[in-house]
């Protein structure tokens, strides 16, 4: 084998994964599994990072042939999970449970394995695109419309097409919309998952980021999401705050049980779960790095999930050395990420006050889709359509909280359209 690795769909944080691998002296091959013209594929994508490209077209044998000189194939974006795991299975390099391979790329299969492991799961059922009436009947049996039901794709991300109908006509309309839409990865949804709605007002949603090696899971960072209904989306991301691992011990334990139930033993994971008055419930697991929080999380905790992910596959000895070093000198800073939402579509009315944002004491990093007057903005309905985000990091929690409130106070100026 050569000193070469491949990364499936190296966009978003996986672009940083490719960059770090290059710094380690590896040649990196881009394994592209969906249309690069998709808006999602443009996120932090840098073609200069790659020493070659293999385009997956549904032919496993051809992909294996094209990647025969590659030392390892790593997961990049969610879109590559099923393909990378299957290719690694054929190569004899799959470290995760092969009998649960579908659970790591499909929400329906994941729920089945979580339930089989004895974990509580929100009631849900999958319906094909032709089964709108059957789905409505199921929802009514669950108490709809008095008891709300979420409809969403079985394989997508970023709250893309996660909808909350409030009456029967709206249910049928939104069912058809989701069933016939493309996922975030430009693939047909083909059907709809209907599940009980867990209100953000009655629960706290946690995210646990971890890296696993040989079945041992290690947490790098823990966050809570702040969500609220927005522009028709039942639980839109508004912000997230870093938590101490000590305060989230029960959530971490539950997250590890979720990983074990899915047969995950190697690599990065991004686990989401609810804490409700009746206990914990799984949301879902991304068997990859999270999106935009990897750098602020590393700076706040001293634990870099990207480096740990590379170590878990390429240098297990370094993986354990990093763990020991961190336990001796842990880093604890406050951090938050604020999602900037646009409540209307149009063009930016005036220059956004970006300098005011960057002057904040806890300012860490940011990205905005519209900065100058006249730049286009779309209505925010999911993470893909947010107007921007701001990451905050500081030694003092009160400084981060104050800056977070300031960002909320100027959000309209950042997204005011005409």
Image: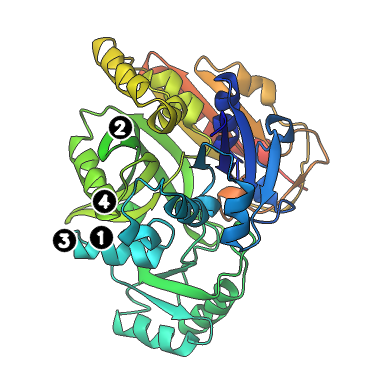
Among the two numbered marks 4 and 2 on one chain, the one whose residue lies closer to the N terminus? 2
Q: Secondary structure at mark 3?
A: loop
Quadrant of residue 314 in the image? Answer: top left
**Relative side of 69 to 312, left or right:** right
Distance in Å between CA atoms under marks 2 and 3: 23 Å
**Extreme residue in the right direction:** 374
Crowding around mark 4 (Cα neighbors within 10 Å: few <14, some 14 to 19, many 20+) is many
Residue located 45% across and 29% down the image: 310
Give the SS element for disc 2: strand
Tag 4–tag 1 contact (CB < 8 Å): yes
Mark 1 residue element: helix
Q: Earlier in the sequence, mark 2 or mark 3?
A: 3
Q: Which mark is residue 118?
A: 3
Name the foreground residue: 308 vs 144: 308
Residue that mark 1 sits on? 114
Which residue shows up at 64% across the image and 21% down it?
Answer: 356
């Amino acid at each position: 084998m050569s000193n070469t690795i491949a990364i499936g769909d190296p966009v978003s944080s996986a672009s940083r994964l490719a960059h770090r691998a290059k710094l380690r002296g590896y040649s990196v091959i881009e394994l592209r599994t969906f249309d690069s013209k998709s808006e999602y594929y443009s996120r932090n994508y840098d073609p200069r990072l790659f020493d070659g490209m293999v385009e997956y077209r549904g032919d496993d044998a051809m992909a294996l042939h094209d990647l025969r000189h590659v030392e390892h194939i790593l997961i990049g974006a969610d879109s590559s999970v099923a393909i990378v795991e299957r290719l690694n299975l054929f190569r004899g390099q799959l470290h995760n449970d092969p009998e649960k391979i579908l659970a790591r790329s499909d929400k329906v299969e994941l729920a089945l394995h979580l339930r089989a492991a004895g974990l509580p799961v929100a009631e849900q059922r999958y319906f094909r695109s032709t089964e709108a009436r059957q789905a409505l009947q199921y929802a009514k049996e669950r108490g709809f419309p008095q008891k709300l039901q979420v409809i969403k794709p079985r394989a997508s991300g970023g709250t893309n097409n996660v909808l909350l109908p409030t009456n029967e006509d709206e249910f049928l309309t939104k069912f058809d919309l989701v069933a016939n839409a493309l996922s975030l990865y430009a693939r047909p949804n083909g059907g709809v998952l209907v599940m009980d709605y867990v209100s953000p007002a009655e629960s706290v949603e946690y995210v646990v980021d971890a890296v696993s090696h040989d079945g041992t899971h290690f947490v790098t960072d823990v966050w809570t999401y702040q969500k609220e209904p927005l522009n028709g989306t039942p639980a839109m991301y508004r912000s997230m705050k870093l938590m101490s691992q000590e305060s989230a011990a029960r959530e971490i334990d539950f997250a590890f049980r979720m990983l074990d139930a899915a047969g995950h033993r190697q690599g990065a994971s991004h686990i989401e779960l609810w804490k409700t008055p009746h206990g914990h419930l799984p949301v879902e697991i991304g068997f990859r790095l999270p999106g935009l929080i990897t750098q602020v999380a590393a700076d706040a905790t001293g634990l870099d999930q990207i480096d740990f992910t590379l170590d878990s596959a390429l240098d297990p000895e370094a993986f354990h050395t990093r763990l020991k070093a961190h336990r001796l000198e842990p880093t604890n800073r406050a951090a938050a990420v604020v999602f900037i939402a646009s409540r209307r579509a149009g063009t930016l009315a005036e220059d956004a006050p970006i300098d005011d944002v960057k002057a904040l004491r806890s300012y860490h990093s940011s990205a905005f889709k519209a900065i100058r007057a006249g730049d286009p903005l779309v209505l925010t309905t999911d993470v893909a359509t947010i107007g921007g985000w701001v990451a905050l990091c500081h030694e003092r929690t009160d400084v981060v909280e104050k800056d977070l409130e300031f960002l909320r106070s100027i959000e309209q100026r950042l997204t005011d359209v005409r």
